[in-house]
Amino acid sequence: MDKFIFKDEPRENNGLATAKADKYWRILIVDDDESVHQVTNLVLAGAEIEGRKLQLISAYSSEQARKLLKDDDSFALAFVDVVMETDHAGLELVEWIRNELKNQAIRLILRTGQAGSAPEAKVIKDFDINDYKEKTDFTSGKMITSVYAGIRAYRDIMTIQRSLDGFKQLITATHDLLKINQIRSFGSAALQHLLSLMNVESSALYIARNHIDFDQSASNMIIACTGKYISESDSLESSAIDEPIKALISETFARKTHYSDDQCFIGYYETGESGNSAASVLYIEFEQDAEHFKTNLAELYVTNVALILEGLTQRHEIERTQTEMLYLVGEAIETRNHHIGSHAQRVSLLSALFAQKLGLSERFVSAIKIAAPLHDIGKVAIPDHILNKPDKLTEEEWRVMKTHATLGSEILARSKASISQLGARIAHYQHENWDGSGYPEGLQGEEIPVEARIAAIANVFDTLGNDRCYSKKWQMDEIKDHIAAQRGLQFEPRLVDILFANFEEFAAIRQQFPETE
C-alpha cells in the first residue's frame, strides 16, 4: 500500500507520570503495510498516558484483527486502515466490531492513504468511528494527540461501565438482604461501586463495626471487604490483616476522627443512636497515587452504606437472638423430661436440611429452621407424672399426652406471624402418619402439611439416638432399620429416601451438636 509519510514536526516531552510496570494501554494496529507498523511503533515508543505505557499489537489484515479482537476485549484503541484485502476491508471491520462483536468501548481511528475511496464526510456519517485521518497528513504530533484523546475517552467509558457493573452488583446483593449470609456480599458490592465511582483501582477496603454491648464489652467485626484484603474471617482481631493496619483502625475508633496519608484513607462513621456507640471504619489503601481519590464522595457514600449495614446487622442480630431464644424454649421443654441436650437445635437443622433436599424455597427453609424447635411446645401443659413416666402409659394417660399436639398449636396460633403459623401446623400435625394412623385428626398422605411431615421424621431420627425416661438410645443401625420399616406407614416415602441418600449429612448434624450429660 501507500507509504506512510509524516510531515516534519518537532518532538515534545510528554511530561507524564511514570507508568506501573504491569499495566498498559493496549493498542491494535490494523494495516497491511509493514512500514505503517514500524512508524507507529517509532512515534509511540515510550509514551505514557495516565501513568501507563502503551502496548502495541500488530494485525496485517482485517481477518487477523477479527481473531485478535474476538479473543481479547482489552484493547483500548485501534488504528484501522481502510484498504487492505479489499477496498473496504477496514470499514467492514469497523461494522463487525460495533454491530457483531458489540464492542462499543474500543476507540477506532480510521487511517487511509486513498481518501477518494472513503470520503471523510461519508465515512464519519455512516460508520461508528472516533477519528478519521489521511496518512499523508497524519503527523507524529497529531498521532500522539489522537492517542491521548482516544485513551482518555476509553478510560472514561470504562469508568462508567465499572460504575454500572458495581450498581448491578449492588442491586443483585440487595435481593435477599435480610438473609444473614448476604451482609458481606452487600457491603463488598457497595464498596466496589465506590471504587468505580472514584476510578480508584485495586484498592483494599474494610468496614469494621465496633459496638459496645450492654455489658460494656467491645467487639470488632469485618462487615465488608474487597481487593487484596478479602478474608473469610468475621473478626478484625483474628483476620490476616497486617498488625500496623489493625493498629491504625483501632486508633481511628479511639480518636473518632478520619485519618489519611499518602498510603491510605481511614474514615470514621458513627451509626448508632444516642446511647448506642456503634461505629464503622472504612479503610482504603492506595495502590496508586491518591490523586483521583475523592474524600468528600467517599464520606457521603460510605456514611449511607454504613447506616444500611448497621441496620442490617441489627436486624440480623435480632433474628439470631430470636432463633436462639426458640432453641432455648425448645430445650427448656426437653428438660421437663429430665434431659439436657441440643435436641431442639438438631431438629431445627435436620428439618432445614430435609426442606433443602426437597427443593423447597430458601424462604421456606429459613422459616422451618426457626419454627421446628417448638414442635413439642404443647408439652408444657402435660403433667410431670405423665411426661416423665418410665413405664407404659395407661389409656387415660395416653389420651392426656396426645393433647400436647393441639395445645401446642393453640399456643403458637395466637401469633399472626407467618413463622408462628408454620410452627403451629408443625406442633398440630407432626404426629399424623403417612398411612392415616396418626393423631389428632388421622390425616393421610399429602393431606398432612409438608412442614409437619418433615418435622416428624427429623424428630424421630434424632430422638431415637438419645436416652429418654422411657427408653435407652438406639444404635444408628437400629434407627435406620426402624425408619426403613416405617417408610410409607409413619413417614412419607420420599423423605425416607432423601434421608438414606444423604445419610452422612444428616448424621453429621448429630455429631456437630452432641448430647450433654
Image (cartoon, grey):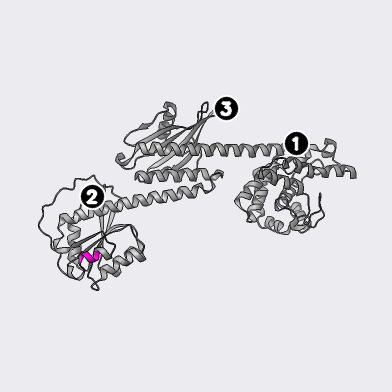
Q: Is disc 2 surrounded by few (<14), some (14 to 19) or many (20+) residues within 10 Å?
A: many
Other residues around mark 3 within 10 Å, as few (<14) / some (14–19) / many (≥20) = few
Q: Position of residue 386 (x, y in %)?
A: 85, 39
Distance Cα–Cα, label 3 vs label 1: 29 Å
**Magenta stretch, residue numbers:** 118-123
Q: What element carries label 1?
A: helix
Identify the residue shown where x is 15% and y is 56%. Answer: 140
Marks 1,2: beta carbons within 8 A: no
Q: Which of marks 1 and 2 is in front?
A: 2
Residue at numbered disc 3: 214
Q: Residue 48 carries which label?
A: 2
Q: What amino acid type is highlighted by mark number 3?
A: Phe
Q: In front: 238, or 14? A: 14
Tell me where residue 69 sits by quadrant. bottom left
Q: Nearer the viewer, residue 104 or 469?
A: 104
Q: Which of marks 1 and 2 is nearer the N terminus?
A: 2
Viewer-side label of 3, 2 = 3
- Residue named by callout 1: 335
Q: State the image coordinates of residue 504 (x, y, percent, origin top left).
A: 65, 53
Q: Residue furthest bottom?
A: 86
**Can residue 240 be seen in the rendering of this structure?**
no
Relative to residue 9, is residue 366 drawn left or right?
right
**Residue farthest along the right direction in this orientation:** 395
Element at label 2:
strand
Q: Which residue is drawn at 23% across and 71% down?
A: 84
Residue 26 position within the rendered picture, expressed as x and y whole percent measured from the top left: 28, 56
